[in-house]
Image (cartoon, rainbow, N blue to C red):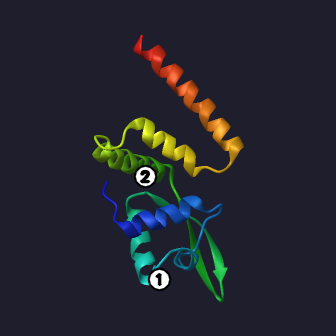
């Protein structure tokens, strides 16, 4: 599924939020997003089952729907990330990419967990190969 930059931005905002957001909250969270753009993006993402209505809340004196990401959206974002990597893998080695991902994380306890998870993944891959 092809997503444009605005759709990707709205999905990123929703995934990073700890709660469902109204369209106005999404506009206020994004760079250069307008209400009409966010509403159009949400309609498309709803139609493709990448977001869902998670509730209704009062926004001033009107009722507003709140939106959250679906599990399918995480799969679509993962596929996009992997396709982007695939197009650059002749330039950027897997080791360089993984090392760069670790450098992005300042939380040492999270780094340790990521290393353990990666070691387990590599061990599982070795077992499967045999």
Decide if residue 52 is in sight here.
no
Comes first in the chain, label 2 or label 1: 1
Count of numbered circles in the view:
2
Q: Quadrant of residue 129?
A: top left
Disc number at residue 35?
1
85 or 71, nearer to the observer: 85
In the rendered view, would you say 108 is above or below 123? below
Q: Are marks 2 and 1 in contact (CB under 8 Å)?
A: no
Q: Quadrant of residue 54?
A: bottom right
Distance of label 2 from label 1 (alpha carbons): 23 Å
Going 46% across and 21% down the picture, which residue do you hit? 125
In the rendered view, would you say 95 is above or below 1? above
Measured as percent of width and height from the top left, residue 78 is found at 43, 47
Going 45% across and 83% down the picture, which residue do you hit? 34
Q: Quadrant of residue 15?
A: bottom right
Measured as percent of width and height from the top left, residue 127 is found at 48, 14
| Label 1 packing within 10 angstroms: few (<14), some (14-19), many (20+) | some
Decide if residue 56 is in sight here.
yes
Where disc 2 sits, the SS reads: helix
| Label 2 packing within 10 angstroms: few (<14), some (14-19), many (20+) | some
Measured as percent of width and height from the top left, residue 14 is found at 54, 63
In the rendered view, would you say 90 is above or below 48? above
Measured as percent of width and height from the top left, residue 90 is found at 28, 40
Going 44% across and 57% down the picture, which residue do you hit? 50
The residue lying furthest to the right in this view is 109
Q: Which residue is the site of mark 2?
A: 77
């Amino acid at each position: 599924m092809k997503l444009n930059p605005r759709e990707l931005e709205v999905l990123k905002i929703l995934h990073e939020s700890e709660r469902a957001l109204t369209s106005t909250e999404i506009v206020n969270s994004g760079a250069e997003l307008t209400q009409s753009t966010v509403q159009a993006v949400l309609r498309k993402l709803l139609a493709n089952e990448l977001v869902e209505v998670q509730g209704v809340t009062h926004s001033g004196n009107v009722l507003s729907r709140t939106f959250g990401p679906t599990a399918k959206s995480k799969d679509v974002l993962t596929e996009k990330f992997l396709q982007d990597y695939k197009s650059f893998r002749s330039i950027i080695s897997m080791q360089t990419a993984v090392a760069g991902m670790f450098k992005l994380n300042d939380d040492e306890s999270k780094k340790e967990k990521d290393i353990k998870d990666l070691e387990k993944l590599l061990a599982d891959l070795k077992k499967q190969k045999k």
